[in-house]
Every structure is written in C-alpha cells, then in structure tokens.
Image (cartoon, rainbow, N blue to C red):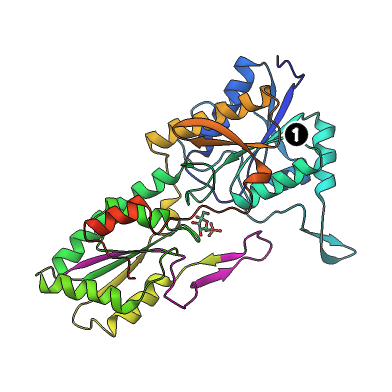
Amino acid sequence: MMKNGVKKIGVMTGGGDCPGLNAVIRAITRNAISKYGLQVIGYKFGYRGLYNNDFVELTYDKVSGIQHIGGTILYSSNKDNLFDYEIEEKGKKVRKNVSDIAVQNLKKEGVDVLVVIGGDGTLTSARDFARKGIKVIGVPKTIDNDLDITDVTFGFNSAIDVATDALDRLHTTARSHHRIMILEVMGRNAGWIALHSGFAGSADVILIPEIPYDIHKVSEKILERQKMGKLFSIIVVAEGAKSKGGDVVVNKIVKDSPDPVRLGGVGNKIATDLEKIVGNQEIRTTVLGHIQRGGSPITYDRILATRYGVAAVELINDNRFGNMVTFQGGKMDYEHLENIIGRPKQVDPKGEVVEASRSIGIAFGD
Ligand code: F6P
C-alpha cells in the first residue's frame, strides 16, 4: 500500500523504440506490485492506447523474461499527439485536441498515476497532461542521449556499442581496399552517438551538428593521412551534421509526428563532395539506421533502465507528480517536467571528449 492512497497506475511507451524499454516496464511493474501492492495496466501504442482505452493488465507473469529483450511489449507510436490528433468527423479528416478523452479514460479505469516513458515529444504531452491535473511521472528514453538534466539515457550505450562495432568492421574493408569509409549514425540534432562511437571506434574524422564542417578541412585530414602512408580513412557523421553555412539533410517528413523531420542522407552528400577533392581514393557510405536502435540492451542499459523503472515508482510513493526521473552524477534523481521540455542537450564543442578526440588526432572538419 502507498500512504498517499495510490492504488492503480498506468504505464505507456511513446516515440521511437529503444533498448531497455522492456526492462523499465518490468521494473515498474515488479516494484509497484511487490513493494506496494499496486495494480498496473499498460497502454498499447503510446498515447493512441490512452485515446482508445486499449490496455493490458501488467502482472508479474506478463513482464517475466523481458528484461533483456529489445523493443517494447506495449508497442509504441511517434505520431499520436492527443493535443493535436487526426480524427474523422462527418467523413472529413480534422485535427483536434482530444486529450479530454484520454483523461476520461484514465478516470474510468481508476488510474491514479500515469507513467510515461518517452523522449522529448512524448514527455511534452506528459507535461501537458500534468497541466490538466493528471498525476504524471516521466521516464526519459532515447538512444540520442539528448535530454537535458540527465547524464545518460538508457539505450544510448547499446546504440554506441552497435555503431562502434560497425566502425570496427568498416576498418577492415577500408584497410584492405585503401578506401574512405563513411558511417552515418543517428542522433537527430545531437552528436552524442557520432562522438562516442567515433572516439571508441578509432574514427579519423567525426562530424557532428554542434561543430559545422568545412569539406576542405575534412579532405585536409585525409590528405595528411595519405602523406603519412595511411591510405584509408574512417569518417563517422551524425545524421544532423551540417556544413558551415549549410543546412541539415532531410530524408523525409512524417506528417502527424510531433517532430516531423526525419534526417538522413548527409553521409552520401559528404561522399559526393569529398570525391571532387580527393579523387584518388574510393569512397563508400554506410547508413546504420535502425540497426543501432534494435536488439537487446547491453548490460549497462539493463541496469540503468531497471534503476529508472524502480525510481519512477518511488517518485509516485513520494508524491513527486509532474516530475521526470533523472540520472545525475551516478545517482537516480528527479526534475520537474516543466524544467526539462524544450531544453535539448547537445555536445559541448569545447567539452572534454571533443578536446580528448582532438588531442589524439581526430578531426572535426572545422
Ligand atoms: O530519436 C531516436 C531516433 O532514432 C533518432 O536518432 C532518429 O533521427 C529518429 O529517431 C528516427 O525516427 P524514425 O524511427 O521515425 O525513423
């Protein structure tokens, strides 16, 4: 029993999937049931489940054997913003604020607290539900590691492990064929995945959104390596990287999504631009894409995700509604959603890892 009278909680996952989501769901459910005797339900497909009142009972059995499995047993959606939702009215598609329906559904099921596991877009809606008086707890989720006031999000380390492995593999072909190999990684408008995988994966050039590049500077590094007898080079580029004075490369626009821009294609652009300057070496581009988001969470992320889940239930017991669980200085903590939304965490171009990269000869194209 919780001393504040909370008896039933709802859990949902929103936005793109991320290794560790199931570990969070499992930890929330187990802590809520075993320590506090709560009833737990899980809404399917994120906010859409809340709108359709589509949920499953989360029992000990239901969350058994899922800690190590990627994806989310509750499914997810990165489109359904109930504050601006597409519905059909009189045969016409219209956009409406349908958040009241979600509120009614929560009341109908007797859900005292909603735990929202998601990234910036999903947590923005969580804040908006909190403003409507719903008791909400946020749990940050993103492989991009771009949420402020939290040092590391679960999934990030699994993603950089995949990207680092890809860089190791690209090295063998680069070396064998004397090629320039470009790896395009995810991260949206933050360069965390590119920076950390490039650092660990012995990249020669790392291009990130926070440090706009000049293609001539990139080629200088490659030519410098050629002079040293290094007849191959590895470039890791964040999907959100842009040239000085240039713009990001957009792959597609996903209507209905709170963040409709899907980045992609900068790796090929760099290959084309570089070929004109460094014509004596073949260039190939690999786009890692969703491979870096799928699969099992690594041990670090299973531990971190489980800690996030346990902490979320403790915040409920402590009446910390409207807050998001954070991880700061090695400890689980919390911060109000109002202070987090709209504050993306980007790489500091003067930060220690960037400086350390420069110290060991990695170029940033600036
Ligand atoms: O935020 C996670 C992320 O994987 C980003 O790195 C990427 O830009 C985006 O989601 C891709 O979204 P989608 O799965 O809709 O293609």
Between 360 and 123, the one lying in front of the other is 360
| Residue 5 lies in the magenta-colored region | no
Q: Position of residue 228 (x, y in %)?
A: 10, 69
Residue 317: percent from the left, percent from the top? 67, 22
* Residue lying farthest to the right in this orientation: 90
Q: Name the residue nearer the viewer: 276 or 23.
A: 276
Q: Quadrant of residue 204?
A: bottom left
The question of residue 247 being in magenta is answered with yes
Task: Please give left or right for residue 14 compared with residue 279 in the image.
Answer: right
Q: Residue furthest front?
A: 350
Q: Nearer the viewer, residue 174 or 350?
A: 350
Which residue lies at the image location 65% right of the left edge and 48% below the top edge? 122
Foreground pick, 126 / 98? 126
Above or below: residue 218 compared with residue 323: below
Occupied quadrant, residue 349: bottom left
Q: Evaluate whether residue 92 shows in this view.
A: yes
Please state the extent of the stretch shown in magenta in the rendering.
232-261
- Measured along the vertical axis of the image, is residue 124 above or below residue 266? above
Give the main secondary structure, helix, strand or loop, of the magenta stretch. loop
Q: Compared with residue 187, is residue 48 higher up or lower down, i.e. above or below?
A: above
Q: Amino acid at mark 1?
A: Lys
Q: Quadrant of the C terminus?
A: bottom left
* For residue 39, side relative to residue 170 (left or right): right
* x and y, in percent, of residue 89 in the image: 87, 62
The N terminus: image quadrant: top right
Query: For the residue labelled by badge 1, is the local secondary structure a helix, a strand or a loop?
Result: loop
Q: Position of residue 195 (x, y in %)?
A: 36, 56
Q: Disc 1 designates what residue?
A: 135
Number of numbered discs on residues: 1
- 91 displayed left or right of 350: right
